[in-house]
């Protein structure tokens, strides 16, 4: 996966985000000054966040900044490092808290800083500003070939939708995993297998297959065939990309977070691929884009209030794993995926919980169980001030996030559990913060609570 994604940036300091699966990104940029990169948990500007400014201050110096605040963590003189008439190559790496940048062909970075409190980076954003427009070539795996061998090539996914085009005689294999490797749990979709006679959905590389479908002549070695693969709350759909018709459909009773896809060919087949898996991809049938955070969202029946108290944010309607701009980051899953503050209706209650974008749904805790909700609301543009507390000690000014079926106010809390920081509901009368985790509702007497 060594192709380059072409990106144009305007003079507006607005980042364009792309998912990353490794601890580095390589790119070429043509701009007179101010090539800015952001390293974030999710596909938007939100803390925590690293920024690497290359050729700032009139193309005289470069800096590393954390959380958009000064003073800069490190500053170096780099006169003439960028050029508006030619591409200049660079790399940016992050590993164990060390953030560094270097020139193409040079091993030693020209700028580096160690963060004592590192966070997992899932996205890279690029922009230009201060009188500069830019053209970027970012190393990514949007189009590539696969040889005749049963070895997956992996790339990251940002939403519950993967669009692919495949040209080959047979055996188009796609896997969905929680890491860039063949490990369980794992979904496999085999299209045009068995000499282009049938297609299947397989779980953990085991038989019997979950779905088997006769598909004679599905693939063609002389033309690209298009497919859409969707996953929402454990439901896996494979569609014909030309007309949207469902080819295969299976529901996993115990879904797992999907962060990567893999592709391969084999059994005498070589394949050519075109992959669209970024947010805002050119898929014909993408999931609807989320509304802009600046809008005043309509509130569904039963939801108390649209705007948050004091004008500190609003609740944005979303579905299918959508993450609205300026969504409030609540924590991260055990695998490092960001979790956002969300809420949903269940059994007459409005329950705060967590949005797991890769699952295509939000989860809320209720009745001892974890409940997946494909439609939900996300807190956007709101506070991100978490205060430790315990039991029924809800401090004044705590942020109300919903209510029980009996009308008791529920607040937004979070706890650390098994390597995650998971958001959930604080029920004062019970003296605990409830989270949904691993299919269960778990209660914790010590927690952090979100303040307005």
Image (spheres, rainbow, N blue to C red):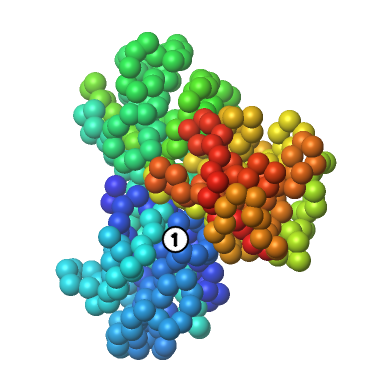
State the image coordinates of residue 113 (x, y, percent, origin top left): 30, 73
Residue at image location 24% in from the left, 32% down from the top: 151
- Asked if residue 285 shows in the view, the reply is no
Badge 1, how many Cα within 10 Å: few under 14, some, many 20+?
A: many
| SS for callout 1 | strand
State the image coordinates of residue 29 (x, y, percent, origin top left): 36, 70
| Above or below, 396 relative to 212 | below
Residue at image location 41% in from the left, 68% down from the top: 50
Q: Nearer the viewer, residue 307 or 210?
A: 307
Q: Which of 166 and 191 is in front in this view?
A: 191
Q: Is residue 101 left or right of residue 441?
A: left
Give the total number of marks visible in the rendering.
Answer: 1
Q: Which of 357 and 62 is in front in this view?
A: 357
Disc 1 target residue: 40
- Asked if residue 410 shows in the view, the reply is yes
State the image coordinates of residue 365 (x, y, percent, origin top left): 61, 36
| Above or below, 14 relative to 263 | below
Residue at image location 31% in from the left, 41% down from the top: 180
């Amino acid at each position: 996966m060594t192709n380059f994604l072409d990106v144009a940036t305007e003079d507006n300091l607005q980042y364009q985000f792309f998912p990353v699966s490794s601890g580095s990104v390589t790119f070429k940029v043509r701009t007179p000054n101010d090539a800015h990169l952001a390293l974030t948990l999710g596909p938007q500007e939100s803390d925590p966040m690293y920024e690497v400014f290359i050729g700032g201050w009139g193309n005289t110096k470069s800096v590393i900044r954390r959380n958009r605040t000064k003073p800069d963590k490190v500053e170096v003189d780099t006169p003439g490092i960028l050029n508006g008439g030619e591409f200049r190559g660079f790399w940016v790496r992050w590993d164990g808290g060390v953030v560094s940048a270097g020139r193409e062909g040079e091993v030693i970075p020209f700028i580096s800083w160690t963060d004592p409190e590192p966070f997992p980076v899932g996205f890279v954003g690029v922009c230009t500003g201060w009188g500069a427009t830019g053209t970027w070539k970012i190393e990514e795996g949007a189009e590539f070939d696969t040889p005749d061998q049963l070895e997956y090539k992996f790339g990251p996914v940002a939403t519950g939708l993967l669009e692919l085009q495949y040209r080959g005689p047979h055996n188009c294999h796609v896997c969905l995993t929680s890491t860039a490797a063949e490990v369980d749990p794992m979904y496999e979709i085999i299209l045009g297998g068995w000499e282009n006679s049938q297609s299947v959905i397989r779980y953990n590389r085991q038989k019997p297959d979950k779905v088997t479908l006769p598909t004679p002549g599905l693939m063609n070695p002389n033309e690209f065939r298009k497919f859409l693969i969707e996953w929402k709350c454990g439901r896996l759909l494979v569609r014909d990309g030309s007309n949207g018709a469902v080819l295969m459909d299976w529901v996993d009773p115990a879904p797992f977070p999907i962060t990567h896809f893999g592709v391969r060919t084999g059994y005498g087949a070589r394949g050519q691929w075109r992959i669209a898996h970024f947010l805002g991809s050119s898929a014909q049938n993408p999931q609807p884009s989320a509304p802009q955070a600046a809008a005043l969202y309509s509130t569904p029946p039963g939801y108390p209030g649209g705007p948050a108290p004091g004008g500190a944010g609003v609740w944005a309607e979303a579905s299918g794993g959508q993450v609205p701009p300026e969504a409030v980051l609540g924590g991260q899953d055990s695998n490092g995926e960001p979790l956002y503050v969300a809420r949903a209706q269940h059994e007459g209650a409005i329950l705060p919980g967590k949005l797991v974008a890769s699952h295509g749904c939000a989860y809320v805790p209720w009745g001892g169980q974890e409940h997946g909700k494909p439609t939900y609301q996300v807190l956007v543009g709101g506070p991100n001030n978490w205060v430790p507390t315990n039991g029924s000690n809800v401090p004044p000014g705590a942020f109300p996030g919903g209510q029980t079926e009996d009308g008791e106010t529920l607040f937004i809390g979070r706890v650390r559990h098994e390597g995650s920081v998971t958001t959930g509901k604080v029920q004062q009368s019970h003296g605990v913060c409830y989270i949904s985790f691993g299919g269960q509702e778990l209660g914790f007497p010590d927690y952090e609570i979100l303040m307005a």
